[in-house]
Amino acid sequence: MSKRSVLVVAHTGRPEAVRSAQLVIERLGQAGIGVRVLDGEADQIGCTGVEVMPSTAAAADAAEVVMVLGGDGTLLRAADLTRASGTPLLGVNLGHVGFLAEAERDDLAATVDRVCDRRYEVEERMTVDVTARRNGTVMGATWALNEASIEKAERERMLEVVAEIDGRPLSNWGCDGVVIATPTGSTAYAFSAGGPVVWPEVEAMLVVPISAHSLFSRPLVVSPRSSVAVEVLPGTPRAVLWCDGRRTLDLPPGARVEVRRGAVPVRLARLHLTPFTDRLVTKFGLPVTGWRGRVRQPSRPSPPLADSQVADAGGAGGATALPGPDGAPEGGSGESGGGAAGGQRG
């Protein structure tokens, strides 16, 4: 039986991340689990008894999980290493928002214990494949977990682009750029540009113009089976393509960027099956004061009146009030009801 191994990726520019990596390596070693670190991080982490790996996709091959210590940027960097192998990423947030992270800094020791015990679930996140062409020639091809953005390269001039959905032209925009995002990326750059938040379970792509000078410049949500293209019109300034803020390509006038659903997802390890709504509230500090939850229902419905009861009531020459939700007669003038309005409803 092969030995278990975990790859540890850290933002070594932060002393806290280095200390956290050392703690993780120590606890994993005590549990008899082998630890890998990247060659570009080994000297800063400074631990012995670890396997130093090249900073390529091979580092994640055969690893059980990749523990990422840092913020979302560090996790996006680690996703480059794990996408091909399908090794799940488990992020511990040592940054600011850390929307992709599963645990916070105070939960570090418990998180390592969960990894040792294999107590986590794995979910897949949609990606996009991105191809840039000019005059039919491929300039470059890459992918993104969060978003692909086409942005102006010169501050003083707008881009002139035309957007296309499923091979049909949609609209020309004079703008600062266009963001094409996944549901995972809907809380990142697309959100800052005015796009909607899309729940991770929803399979879709977002098209969000940035500061467009157009009446039709609203964010769009399109099918994951659609193809989205943005062409940089001739005569416009050059643009630049960014994927997850990491991979970049210069786009001359006449270039075309095509985006489709990615063939390979990214896998994330989850410790808590927390509703996405709760994650939004926590990460963005949303105000929920005053929420009372679901309307309380009666514990047991009142039985229907029997035919004999209806007949008796009619024969007695009076009407019997049906019980309200609180058990008191509906609309009665009883002593506890406070007149025709009845008592306080539960």
Image (tube, grey):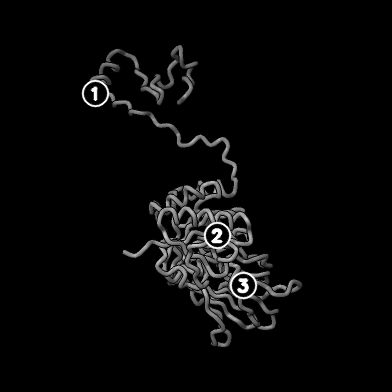
Number of other residues with Cα within 10 Å of mark 2, as a class: few under 14, some 14 to 19, many 20 or more: many
Alpha-carbon neighbours of circle 1 within 10 Å: few (<14), some, or many (≥20)? few
Distance, label 2 to label 3, CA atoms, is 16 Å
Name the residue rendered at 38%, 61% in the picture: 4
Amino acid type of the residue tagged 1 in the rendering: Asp
- Please, which residue is most extreme toward the left here? 308
Q: Nearer the viewer, mark 3 or mark 1?
A: 3
Residue placed most toward the observer, 120 or 322: 120
Spot occupied by residue 304 in the image (x, y as percentages of width and height): 29, 26
Position of the N terminus, as image quadrant, is bottom left
Q: Which residue occupies 69% across, 83% down?
A: 235
Q: Is residue 176 visible?
A: yes
The disc, 3 or 1, on the residue closer to the chain's N-terminal end is: 3
Considering only order in the chain, which callout, 1 or 2, is on the residue closer to the N terminus? 2
SS for callout 1: helix
Kindly report which numbered mark, 2 or 1, lies closer to the viewer in this rendering.
2
Q: Can you tell which mark lies on residue 186? A: 2
Residue furthest out toward the right:
156
Under circle 2, the secondary element is helix
Q: Nearer the viewer, residue 45 or 180?
A: 45
Q: Position of residue 71 (x, y in %)?
A: 58, 58
Q: Which residue is mark 3?
A: 150
Tag 3: amino acid: Ile
Using a 10 Å C-alpha cutoff, classify the residue at mark 3 as few (fewer than 14 neighbours), some (14 to 19) or many (20 or more): many
Q: Are marks 3 and 1 in contact (CB under 8 Å)?
A: no
